[in-house]
Amino acid sequence: MNQQNISNQVDPQQLALYQQMMAQAAAGAPPNAMPQQQQMSPQQMAQQQIIMAMQQQQQQQQQQQQHAAHAHALHAQQAQQQQHAQLQAQVQAQQQQQQQQRQKAFAQMQAQQQQQQAQAQAQQHQQQAVYTQRQQAFKRLNRPSLVESNDSYEQIDSFSHRDLAISRFRLNHELMAEVFSPHHITQYEKPAPLYTKDDIPKLKERAEKAERDVEEQISKNKAQTENWNKTFAHKPYAV
């Protein structure tokens, strides 16, 4: 492409001279080395200078292109490094977030386990307390009653109200068991009735008489109350 641009700007003789110089440069000969039998005219020297200037311009363009390519590659490398750093930062942030979530879940699980252990311990203590109370009540129920043991009144003061209530319950229970024992039930005889059907008219008369007596007593009380109100009633003093 560069040779086409040069061919458009110089004549065929100059192009041949340029190609000869390029071949000498490729072979390692200096660009000014020319055949001894050929002498350069002023026009050829001017053309040679033009060609050399064009070569320098071409070299500068190549250097600029190389610099631009190097800068582009460096920019692409920096962008790739920046993208890689961003990806690493995102991965680290995700890992930290996952670690925090795991730590939070572990802390919640520990708190839940501690709460369950505390509830289990509280329930165990409550069951132990209920069991202890039942054992104490069982021992107290199996204790001889105050009457059976013939304890004095001084010893009764040492018992609590609960002990006295349990002793009273034992006595009542034993008394009821004795009253309603099969031996007493079999010996029980139904008592004779106090009244018969013939006594019904008499009982009705007694009931009617009792009602009349109550009504008379109510009327007497009412009349006496009115009499007292009239007797003790007084007018307020005039001011």
Image (tube, rainbow, N blue to C red):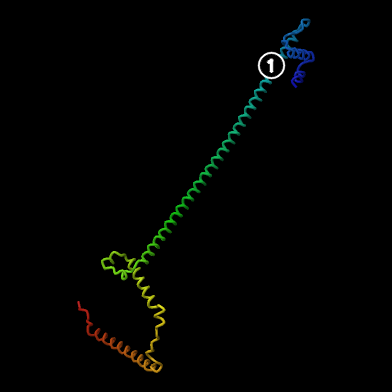
Taking 3 as reference, is 144 left or right? left
The residue drawn where x is 64% and y is 24% is 70
Q: Which residue is mark 1?
A: 56
Task: Please tell me whether residue 121 is drawn above or below residue 199 in the rendered image.
Answer: above
Estimate the x, y position of residue 92 in percent, counting from the top left.
56, 37
Amino acid at dot 1: Gln
Estimate the x, y position of residue 53 in percent, counting from the top left.
70, 15
The residue drawn where x is 29% and y is 69% is 150
* Residue 27 visible in the displayed image: yes
Query: Split into 4 quadrants, where in the image is the C terminus?
Result: bottom left
The crowd level at tag 1 (other Cα within 10 Å; few <14, some 14-19, many 20+) is few
Task: Please tell me whether residue 201 is drawn above or below residue 101 in the rendered image.
Answer: below
Given residues 170 and 48, the one toward you in this image is: 170
Given residues 8 and 191, the one toward you in this image is: 191
Taking 123 as reference, is 74 left or right? right
Estimate the x, y position of residue 158 in percent, counting from the top left.
29, 64
Q: Quadrant of residue 190?
A: bottom left
Q: Quadrant of residue 37?
A: top right
Given residues 21 and 120, the one toward you in this image is: 120
